[in-house]
Image (cartoon, grey):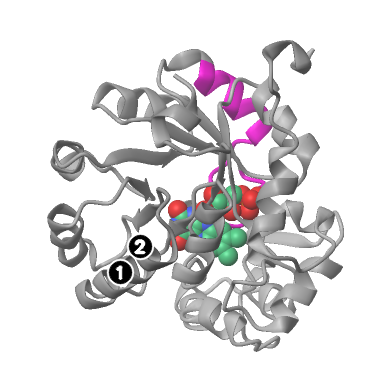
Amino acid sequence: MQLTNLLHIQKPIIQGAMARISKPVLVGAVSNAGGLGVLTTTDSSAQLLQSDLKAIRQATKNPFGVNLMLQQPNISELLPVLLANPVPVVFTSAGNPAPFLKDLLDVGTLVIPVIPSVKIARKMADIGASAVVAEGMESGGHIGIETTMTLVPQVAEAVKIPVIAAGGIGTQAGVKAAFALGATGVQVGTAFLVAEETPVADNYKQLVIQANDNGTVVTGTGANRVRSLKTPLTEKLLATIDSDTFNQLSSGSLQRAISGDIEHGTFMAGQSAGMITKIQPAKAIVTELNKGVPTIIEELF
Ligand SMILES: Cc1cc2nc3c(=O)[nH]c(=O)nc-3n(C[C@H](O)[C@H](O)[C@H](O)COP(=O)(O)O)c2cc1C
C-alpha cells in the first residue's frame, strides 16, 4: 500500500520527531504543507501533551503523528491521553511497543516503530505494526549501526508493510534514492532542524548550515550512541573514559544546545547537515523534498 494512502497525506515526507524541538508549531506547518509532522513528547506531562494536541488540531486539519521514545520515563503517563483522545499515528523509537501496540490500533491509531535492523523490522511486522521507519546511522540524534543505503533495501525485502527510509536524506536526490531502495516514504530530521518554526537558537541553526561533509561525530556506546555536530563538548566526550563524568557532561546537553550554549551543548544533527544551506519555512522544505518523489515507478530507472 502507498504510504500516502495509509497515512491520508498528500506527500510521503515525514518530519521525524526531534526531542524538545518538534513542537506543535513545526508539526502543524509540516502537516499543513501536505507532509506529516511528528510531535516530540520527551519532556511532556499528560497535561502538556493534551495542550500540545489541542494546539496542533487548531493549527491543522491534516493528519499528524506523536513520538513515544520508549526510554522516556513518562510513557505510562502519556498513553492514557493517546488512548482517550486518539491521534492518527504514533511513532515509537528506542524500545518495543508490543505492550501497548494493540491498544493503540484498537482506537484507530496507526503504530509505526523506528527500527535499526531486519530482525526487529520482521518482529514489528509480525506483531501488527502499520509500517516501519528503517533508520540508518547517518541520522542525527540516537543512532544504530547500519547505513540507510544497506538497511532500507534489506528491510523492504523482508517485510510486506510499508518501509519509510530515514537517515542522511536532506535533498530531492536523497528522496529519490530512498524510493529506489524500496522505501515508500522518507523520514527527515536534520533538514527540519533549521526550519523557521523550530524553537532552536539561531547559532544552532548556523552550526548546521556551516557543517561540511565531516561535520558530525558519534559519541557514546550501545543505546547511547548519539550523532551530533563537532563542538567543544563532543571533543571532551570523546576523550572521556569515566562513565560518571560522561553522563555528567551529557545530561541536559541537548537543551543547552537548543538554548545556544556552544561550550556545553550537544548539537544533535545528522550527516545531511553538510547539504543544508539555509533557514527556510517548513513548507518550503516539504515542497523541495517532495520533488524527489517519483510520480511513476519508471522514473526510478
Ligand atoms: C536533534 C534531533 C533530535 C531527535 N530526537 C528524536 C527523538 O526524540 N525521537 C526519535 O524517534 N527520533 C529522534 N531523532 C531522529 C529523527 O526523528 C529522524 O529519524 C532522523 O533525524 C532522520 O535522519 P536525518 O537526521 O539524517 O534526517 C532526532 C533527530 C535529531 C536531528
Left/right placement of residue 274 relative to residue 204 reads right
Q: Where residue 74 appears, x then y in whole percent?
A: 23, 68
Q: Is mark 2 within 8 Å of ligand 1?
A: no
The residue closer to the viewer here, 178 or 233, is: 178
Ligand 1: which quarter?
bottom right
Mark 2 to mark 1 CA distance (whole Å)? 5 Å
Point out the image quarter for the C terminus: top right
Secondary structure of the residue carrying numbered label 1:
helix
149 drawn magenta: yes
The quadrant where residue 266 appears: bottom right
Q: Where residue 164 appears, x then y in whole percent?
A: 52, 33
Q: Is residue 230 above or below residue 297?
A: below
- The reply to whether discs 2 and 1 touch (Cβ–Cβ < 8 Å) is yes
Point 58% across, 26% down: residue: 183
Magenta extent: 137-156
196 drawn magenta: no
Location of mark 2 (residue): 57
Q: Where residue 237 appears, x then y in whole percent?
A: 62, 73
Location of mark 1 (residue): 54
Q: How many marks?
A: 2
Point out the image quarter for the N terminus: top left
The kind of residue on which mark 2 rests is: Arg
The quadrant where residue 24 appears: bottom left
Secondary structure of the residue carrying numbered label 2:
helix
Left/right placement of residue 297 relative to residue 106 reads right
Point 65% across, 87% down: residue: 260
Q: Is residue 160 above or below residue 95?
A: above
Work out whether residue 225 can be spotted.
no
